[in-house]
């Protein structure tokens, strides 16, 4: 993927809410550029950690998006019949590494959004976007 085609979606929710509750909002906010014309709303493949390994997320992705989500350690139950869930380990490691590096840059370089001192979601979103711009300028000079 090139820099221009990276799908970016930012959704801010309460700090004590599970990540999988905001899955549909994140997916609805994705816009994938693919050359000229209007960006697509549906990516070809989505990688997520084991927190997104829920029936709702898999049912949402089943419509035309390939899911690369590992089965969680707590929930090792696989479907008894049918084929097992799809997981591309090499692609998953590559994407997971870039996501973890981004969050390390965000938490190490910018203390205020990491601790979430802000009460308003709009202020926190603005700080995160500002931090993303600074990270982008530092990394892609």
Image (cartoon, rainbow, N blue to C red):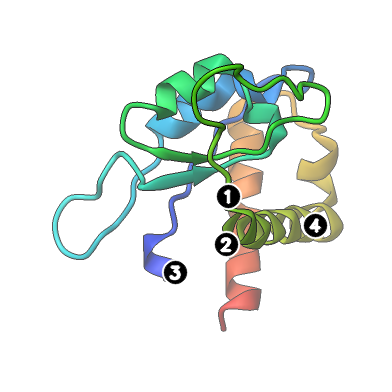
The answer to whether residue 50 shows anywhere in this view is yes
Q: Is residue 60 left or right of residue 19?
A: left
Looking at the rendering, which quadrant does residue 81 occupy? top right
Disc 1 crowd, CA 10 A, few/some/many (<14, 14-19, 20+): few
Q: Secondary structure at mark 2?
A: helix
- In the depicted view, which residue is nearer to us: 43 or 55? 55
Work out how far the residue at label 2 is from the one at label 3, CA to CA, in angstroms: 13 Å
The residue where tag 1 is placed is: 129
The residue where tag 3 is placed is: 3
Work out how far the residue at label 4 is from the one at label 1, CA to CA, in angstroms: 15 Å
Q: Please say if 135 is above or below 9.
A: below
Disc 4 crowd, CA 10 A, few/some/many (<14, 14-19, 20+): few
Q: Position of residue 19 (x, y in %)?
A: 67, 26
Q: Which residue lies at the image location 64% right of the left edge and 47% below the top edge?
A: 128
Work out how far the residue at label 1 is from the one at label 3, CA to CA, in angstroms: 16 Å
Task: Identify the disc placed on residue 133.
Answer: 2
The residue where tag 4 is placed is: 104
Name the mark nearer the viewer: 4 or 2. 4
The answer to whether residue 120 shows anywhere in this view is no
Contact between marks 1 and 2 (CB within 8 A): the answer is yes
């Amino acid at each position: 993927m090139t820099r221009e085609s990276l799908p970016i979606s930012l959704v801010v929710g309460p700090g004590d809410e599970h990540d999988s509750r905001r899955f549909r909002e994140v997916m609805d906010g994705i816009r994938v550029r693919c050359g000229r014309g209007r960006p697509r709303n549906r990516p070809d493949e989505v990688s997520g950690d084991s927190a997104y390994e829920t029936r709702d997320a898999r049912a949402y992705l089943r419509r035309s998006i390939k899911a690369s989500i590992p089965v969680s350690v707590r929930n090792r139950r696989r479907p008894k019949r049918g084929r097992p869930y799809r997981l591309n380990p090499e692609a998953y490691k590559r994407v997971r590494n870039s996501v973890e590096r981004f969050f390390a840059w965000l938490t190490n370089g910018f203390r205020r959004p990491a601790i979430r001192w802000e009460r308003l979601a709009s202020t926190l979103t603005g700080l995160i976007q500002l931090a993303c711009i600074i990270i982008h300028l530092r990394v892609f000079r």
